[in-house]
Image (cartoon, grey):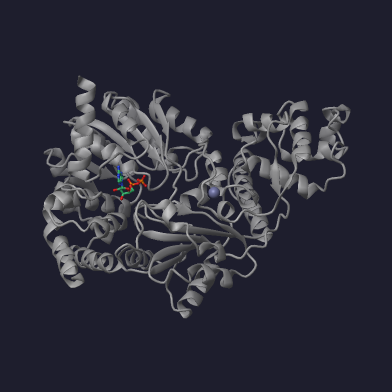
Amino acid sequence: MMESSSATSSAQLLKSMFGYDAFRPGQAEIIEAIGQGQHVLAVMPTGAGKSLCYQLPAVAANTRTVVVSPLVALMDDQVAALGANGIAAGKIHSGQSREQNIENWQKFADAEAKLLYLAPERLMQPRMLDALRRKNIGMFVIDEAHCVSKWGADFRPDYEALSQLKERFPNSTIAAFTATADKATRGDIVQKLTAGNCAVFVKGFDRPNIALAVAPKQNLKNSLLAFLRDKKHVSGIVYCLSRTETDKLADWLDFQGFKAIPYHAGKSPEYRREAQHRFMHEEATIMVATVAFGMGIDKADIRFVVHASLPASMEAFYQEIGRAGRDGAAAETLLLYSLQDMLRRQRMIFEGEGDDHFKMLENKRLQALIGYCETAGCRRLALLSYFDEIIDRCGNCDNCLHPPAVEDYSEVARQIIACMRATGQFFGAAHIVDVLRGVQNVKVKERKHYELKSFGAAQKIPKDLLQSLIRQLIAQGAIRVNLERYGALQITDKGQAIFSGNEPFMARIDTKPKRIAGAQFRSGHRQIAEDLPADTNPALLQALKDLRLKIARERAVPAFVVFSDKTLIHMAHVAPQTEDEFLHINGVGQKKLDEFFVPFVEVIRTHKRQEL
Ligand code: ADP
Ligand code: ZN
């Protein structure tokens, strides 16, 4: 009976403390594993609901939880959001006075607050470690855990020191979370933080509410205007590659009547703080930014993300678009790419820091993204197969909505796969192409690959078409790039099916698609992602949003801390009038019922009277 009663109590806490009716994919399993005292590594995309996976067990436990978080802004938002649900949490960071830090520590020491947020370098100070050893610390939560690994997207030496926790606190559970970690990185994190003794969860990479589209970058400004035409009243991010590009584009958008804020590492810390604050708190702002903007942005109602040029890798891209639509309501993305951008990216990798192995990995990640750009099939399928998650076509990407022209390339695909088989699945795309085209180079001679049947089998097919077909095979999940084996191409089950003629291989003919950015965005996909259409009761929804903004301003918190867009859409739809009805809205828990029932229901009643 233990199990079912603990399961019910998690579900009860979910509603009473956090206001949610159901767990999101993965949450219940992770919470259960933590409850059983297992170390966990959870890889879940931004917005999937990682925080709840440790906050709920932290609240349920009779021990204390320490949360390691890299950024001040992130800690502030988390603590504010917890506070709004009536959960006390402490934080210690450099943005606060010494007195405030001491007071926060005291609250935690007295168990008035069960959670304490701090940065890794503070946690690992000998005095702090000593003080913690004297308290009962049930769990250490490592947020942004990919920073532990040199293979990860954002290695931080401060984070590496966290590998000592397992020995220093052998009785505490280690719960690590990240939005981005491929297989190699996951293995490294598990080794460092838990010496391999860890349950790994990779969950919920699918974000069906985010619409995906790619367009060639022919006229950036026209594409942007077309895309933004119906987005005057919402907030979003436009990512650029360089600082100059960022400043110029922000200026130009401003001139076009948008509220655009440039953001990059060349601006002063004060400027950046202010810019971020405006983006969080003001409505309908566009952040025009380099990648310097993003980590720790906890704004749930970002409605679009545009990439004005190609991101660094599939992971980077995924993380950047993942900032949109965290409230679960519909959001749109657009990636504009050109050959020049691609070459620029490759140069950046090869001229950048890191050893050859690192550069090779980065390049493979970039190639995967190019595959995403080139696919004729469902974009989401291409994106998710990179993260080992398998789906059917999504119905919410440009290719699903407006399928591009494709041709049957099964015969060439079979030749490619045959060549991979013949060479033992040990080689990358370049060598496979050379063998197929019958190129007599050193590698071919050394390995005697000129003796193979595949040698010269695709002599008549242009090199770039072969390369594109290989990228499309990767994008469709028929070939896998093995990062741990130096980027060797390997055949998947799907590849096998194509090889044996059980499945056709259809590929985009034109590697330079001629579709117009934004144009395919107009019609009917919004409802696919949303449980409820946003326009069932637009006047009431607006009134609810106005009230939310007023309350958020009074409390100096971001609007979504009060209620998410999705909650308000649900509320506008149901128009609750009793406490019971109000509590049934997804996103309303006991605390929010107590605080917000009166003002929100007042607005709903006024609205009803006006309707009569
Ligand atoms: P992550 O840390 O994975 O990026 P968050 O923990 O910030 O994501 O969660 C994103 C949003 O989803 C937050 O607004 C959070 O309150 C909400 N959320 C989390 N779990 C649930 C759930 N089970 N049902 C509904 N909303 C949820
Ligand atoms: Zn799709």
Residue visible at 63% across and 64% down in the picture: 217
- Residue 110 image position (x, y, % from top left): 11, 39
Say if 37 sits above or below 457 in the image: above
Name of the residue lying farthest toward the top: 1
Which quadrant does the N terminus fall into? top left
Residue visible at 22% across and 48% down in the picture: 82
- Can residue 294 be seen by looking at this rendering? no
Name of the residue lying farthest toward the front: 612
- Residue 112 image position (x, y, % from top left): 12, 41
Q: How many marks?
A: 0
Say if 492 sits above or below 396 in the image: above
Q: Is residue 72 left or right of residue 9?
A: right
- Quadrant of residue 244 within the rendered picture: bottom right
**Closest to the observer: 90 or 475?**
475
Q: Is residue 126 left or right of residue 424?
A: left
- Residue 247 image position (x, y, % from top left): 50, 71
**Closest to the observer: 196 or 417?**
417
- Residue 78 image position (x, y, % from top left): 27, 49
Residue visible at 45% across and 62% down in the picture: 237
- Can residue 105 be seen by looking at this rendering? yes
